[in-house]
Image (cartoon, rainbow, N blue to C red):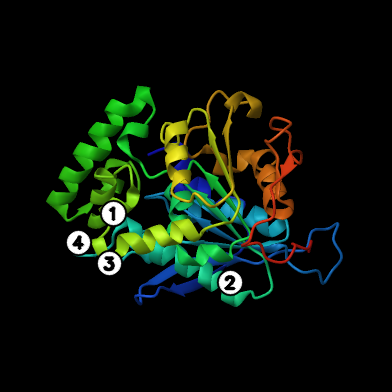
Amino acid sequence: MDPALDPARAHRNTAGPAPIEITCDDGQVLHGHVFEATVPQVAPAGGVPQGVVVIAAATGVLARYYRRYAAFLAANGFIAVTFDYRGIGASAPATLRGFRARWHDWGTRDIDAALRWARTGHEGLPLFFVGHSFGGFGVGLAPESRHLTRILTVGAQHAHWRDYATGHRARFLARWHLSMPLSTLVHGFFPGKRRGWLEDLPRGVALDWARSRKDFTGNAPAGLRERMREAQRALRTPILAVAPTDDPYATASAMARALAGTPRAPASTHHLEPRDYGREGIGHFGLFHDSYRDTFWRQTVSWLEHGIDPWAASGNLPGTGERFPPSSGAGPAPRRV
C-alpha cells in the first residue's frame, strides 16, 4: 500500500469531527464526518463560516485519509465534510459479496447526496468542492454540482488506460485491467486490502474501472447515460485542476479528458513540480499529507476563499495569482469567521 495511505498516519493531528449520515436518493446511507469551522485567533468572535467544503475521495481510499486536510480547512474558517462512498470504509456492508454498486453511482448518487446534505443543512453559505482522483471527476456527474461556487480537483481523472504515464502503463494494465477484474470475478468483489493496493472495492466499481472507456458515461446503462451527460453539460462552476508532474494517473491527457466532460465550466489546469515544494516526488496521493500544510494546503485556501488561482502567474507562491471570472453557480461571497 502507498505509504501516504497508511491509516495510522491519517489519524494524527486532527480535530474532533462529528459523525453524520447522508441518505442518497435510492435509500443508501453513507457515513461521514463534519468538521465545524473554528474561529481563528485573528478573527472576531461570532463570525460567519467561509462556506462549506465537501471533500470527495479517490477510488479505494478511506474518507479518514482526508481528515487532517478537513481539520485544516475548519481551522481556516470553513465547515468541511468528508464521507465514504457506498461499499467503502464506514459505508460498506458486512460483506461486499453480492453488494451492488457501480462506479458512476459514486458520482450520480453519493457525491450528489453529500452536496445536497451540505447545501440544505447550511443555507446561505457558499458551497465548495475538493475532489481527489475519481472524486474530482465524479462531481461533474452530480446534478447538485450546479450549486457549487468553486471546485478544486487534485489528480482528477477516470483511469482510461491510454492516459496512464508511459513508464507505468504496462504495470497498471497488468494490475488494474487484468489482475483486478480476474480477482473480482473469482471473489465477487475486489480484495484490494489483501493485496495491499487499496480498500476492497464492490464488484461493479472494480469492473467499471477495468473497462473504463474514453467516454466514462459509455459504461453506464443506456437509460442513464444522457442524464449523466446533462449533469456534466449543466456544470458552469469554475474548476481549478491540479496534479503533480509525477502523478502517473493524472497525466496531461487524463486531466484534459476529465475536463472535456464538463465543457461549460471555466477551467484552469496546473501541473505542479515536486521541486517547487522541496521534494523529489509527490505522486498521486502526497498532496493530502500534512507535510503540505504550509504550502499546498494554504494555496488551496486562496482558491476556495478568494477565487484566486495561486499558480496562474507567480509559480507556486501561496496567496498569489489571478481571479477567475464569476460563475453562474457562485453563491454569496465568503466571509471570514
Mark 2 secondary-structure assignment: helix
Distance in Å between CA atoms under marks 4 and 2 = 34 Å
Q: Nearer the viewer, mark 3 or mark 4?
A: 4
Circle 1 Cα neighbour tier, 10 Å, few/some/many (<14 / 14–19 / ≥20): many
Q: Nearer the viewer, mark 3 or mark 1?
A: 1
Q: In the drawing, what numbered circle is on residue 94?
A: 3
Residue that carries the numbered disc 2 in the rendered image: 119
Q: Nearer the viewer, mark 4 or mark 2?
A: 2
Residue at x 32% of width, y 53% of height = 217
Distance in Å between CA atoms under marks 3 and 1 = 17 Å
Residue at x 83% of width, y 58% of height = 41
**Is residue 22 found left or right of 37 in the rendered image?**
left
Look at the picture and state if 243 lies above or below 153: above
Residue at x 47% of width, y 66% of height = 143
Residue that carries the numbered disc 4 in the rendered image: 97
Q: Earlier in the sequence, mark 2 or mark 1?
A: 2
Mark 1 secondary-structure assignment: helix
